[in-house]
Amino acid sequence: MYNFELNKEIDTPLYIQLYQKFKTLIEENQLVGEKLPSIRSLAKDLKINNVTVVNAYKLLEQEGYIYTIKGSGTYIKKFHPSTDISYIDEGDLDLMISGILPISKNSINFSSMSPTPDLFPIVEFKQSLVEVLDRDGGLAFLYPEINGYEPLRESISKFLLNYYNTKVNKGQILITSGGQQALDIISKTLINQGDPIFVENPTYSGAFAVFNSRGAKIIGIPMNEDGIDISELKSLIKKYKPKFLYIMTNFQSPTTYSYSEEKKRELLDLANTYNFYIIEDDFLTDLSFGDKKTPLKSLDNSDKVIYIKSFSKIFMPGIRIGFITLPHKLFRDILKAKHTTDISSSGYLQRAFDLYLRKGYWMNHIENIKRVYFEKYKIMLGELEKLKDYGIEYMEPNGGLSLWLKLPKEIDAFELYKECYENNLSIVPGKIFYIDNNIYNNYIRISFGAVSNEEIVKGVNILYDILNEPFKNNKYLPFI
């Protein structure tokens, strides 16, 4: 299969030797587009342990040489020197839809919505971690209940009531390892092969990937600036009878739109009339720079809204803490799905985050990052003014971490993305958020979550120069 000679007599570990041999072949473009052998077959062929192959593959994947498609196998990425972006093509859309965007080492990162480490509340959370260890000792490392550490569920119940005027009993709350796991658990519970489900179009690509992996028939409903297109939704409900509708009501990803109160009530009426659930995914409601936003769940009197909230995105992304509110009818099934996924989320982190909430640290953190992000938001808006001369349009969301830019129809967003990449600026082409992503799309999303104020200015200037150059020298970006 592969004529590799691994030397067991030298100090270099076998997995490093294997990694180096694959790396050399990939960099020399000898294996472009090839599928790697399975772990078991390669280990057998080379007469080495499976773990050796696993560790070599992991190292290759960490460094961007290979990628894995669940259920399909491990593949070698097309490799070119870092100065050459010709390998970025439409075939990479599958990776982008899964949330993987090529970012060069020195890029200004307008693609990520994660906060910068300087905003992490290290001191306060460290106090919570230490206090839990002093208070609970070894008990902190026992498995909590499957649905989560009871005091944390109680704290979240009070948080929802006090901050969002949303009444949810602690018994209806399930702690998860972030929002993505919550989507996975719900999908395992509600989706059978071929079931119709509705999503906003465009929508969060991570949710689409989860629903698609369960074999759902995914139907996109167009978005308006005040929320989903209700007329189109009514028409499609009668035709397909969906299991559920997946939405983000405040600062939707990627459009940044927020639902009007009228539209929220219409959605609840439709859910009750046609007996489907609404999955409300929320991680940005707290980041409103104007009037306070509330989730759809606050209006739900019929147990039709499954509310997902992730604390990770605007807390510390590596601390995977989130929760789901469970309708009574689905409680047992979702609990079983959680148990088969990972038994339970980290008890130590749950205890620490409970203390963090009870001491009021969370609300202090929110107020702090709102001030920081509002400043970034204002700088971004000010810099974007210079792009309006080139036909760039956008709505000011007054919250969240992104802006959704509409380009002139003659500019292809994917080609602009490649131009930006070449100039060390990372943006997200809007095409990856659409259900029918083969259509031409002239939107891009730019985010200010992971950049400094200075980088915002520099990044928008790069975008300005790219847009300015074609017209100034009678050049052009590719048309479709």
Image (cartoon, rainbow, N blue to C red):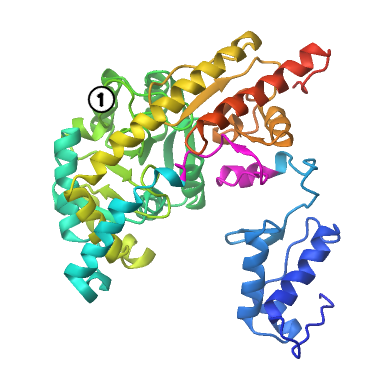
The number of discs equals: 1
Q: Is residue 462 left or right of residue 200?
A: right
The reply to whether the magenta stretch includes residue 355 is no
Q: Quadrant of residue 333?
A: bottom left
Query: What's the residue type where badge 1 is placed?
Result: Lys
On the question of residue 305 being in view, the answer is no
Question: In the drawing, does residue 312 fall left or right of residue 147?
Answer: right
Q: Quadrant of residue 467?
A: top right
Give residue 57's position: percent from left, percent from top: 66, 68
Position of residue 136 relative to residue 183, above or below, is below
Q: Which residues are magenta?
A: 92-116
Q: Position of residue 92 (x, y in %)?
A: 68, 44
In this view, the residue in front, 239 or 115, is 115
Identify the residue at horizontal 16%, vertical 46% (top origin): 157
- Specify the quadrant that holds the C terminus: top right
Report whether residue 180 is seen.
yes
Q: Residue at x 29, y 50 (%)?
A: 323
Crowd tier of the residue under label 1, counting other residues whose Cα lies within 10 Å: few below 14, some 14–19, many 20 or above: few
Q: Position of residue 266 (x, y in %)?
A: 27, 22
In the rendered image, the vertical position of residue 120 relative to residue 130, given as above or below: above
Q: Is residue 101 magenta?
A: yes
Extreme residue in the bottom direction: 9
Q: Main secondary structure of the magenta part?
A: loop
Q: Is residue 73 left or right of residue 366?
A: right
Looking at the rendering, which quadrant does residue 295 occupy?
top left
Q: Determine the residue positioned at 78% across, 86% down.
A: 7
Instruction: Give the residue number, with chain letter if any, for mark 1.
Output: 292
